[in-house]
Image (cartoon, rainbow, N blue to C red):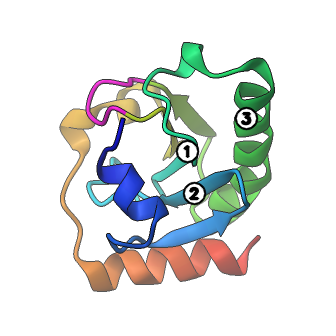
Amino acid sequence: MTSLFTGIIKGEIPCHKIAETDTYLAFLDIKPINPGHTLVIPKKEIDYIFKLPDDLLSGLMVFAKKIAPAIEKSYPCRRLGVMVCGIEVPHCHIHLVPINGIGDMSFANAKLTAHEELAKVAEKIRSNL
């Protein structure tokens, strides 16, 4: 099933890329809950996280784990929150969000962020990979 993320994967829709392999992609959310809010996706078009084959699911988490320290170094926080909602875009994805408390993990805090600001955030995180 194609989605907004399919366009991002194909390079048809721009994104602020953090990291990429042949199988996975990490990029900034354009409506971040907090600076550094990163989405991690498999490139394979699968709608729901629990429909991923085991190897793709475990690989997704291992890929996210490699990015997490760079986000934490760029945006110091008590924890890097991990959230899977799976409703807003029909393509499996996880959210990595720098947080200091449980209340920080709310989409009510999300705000559309300017391209220029996202570019700075992405560069900061990539510099810490």
Residue at image coords 33%, 80%: 117
**Given the current orientation, which residue lies at the most extreme front position?**
1
Give x and y (percent) for residue 79: 63, 38
Q: Let me know if residue 86 is in the magenta part.
A: yes
- Location of residue 102 (image quadrant): top left
- The quarter in which the N terminus is drawn is top left
| Label located before the other in sequence (1 or 2) | 2
Taking depth in this image into account, of 52 and 120 the one nearest to the observer is 52
Mark 3: few/some/many CA within 10 Å (<14, 14-19, 20+): some
Q: Which numbered dot is residue 61?
A: 3
Apparent side of residue 22 relative to residue 41 in the rendered image (left or right):
right
43, above or below 81, in the image: below
Residues at marks 1 and 2 touching, judged by CB atoms closer than 8 Å: yes
Quick one: 99 or 13, which is closer to the camera?
13
Position of residue 72 relative to residue 13, above or below, is above
The spot of residue 38 in percent (x, y) is 50, 53
Q: Specify start and end residues of the magenta stretch as a single range.
A: 85-90
* Tag of residue 91: none
Q: Secondary structure at mark 1?
A: strand
Of callouts 3 and 1, which one flags the residue occurring earlier in the amino acid sequence?
A: 1
**Tag on residue 41?**
1
Disc 2 marks a residue whose amino acid type is Ala
The answer to if 113 sits in the magenta stretch is no
Which residue type does callout 3 highlight?
Met
Q: Nearer the viewer, residue 29 or 56?
A: 56
Mark 3 or mark 2, earlier in chain: 2
Tell me if 114 is positioned left or right of 68 in this view. left
Q: CA distance from mark 1 to mark 2?
A: 6 Å
* Distance (Cα) linking label 3 and label 1: 10 Å
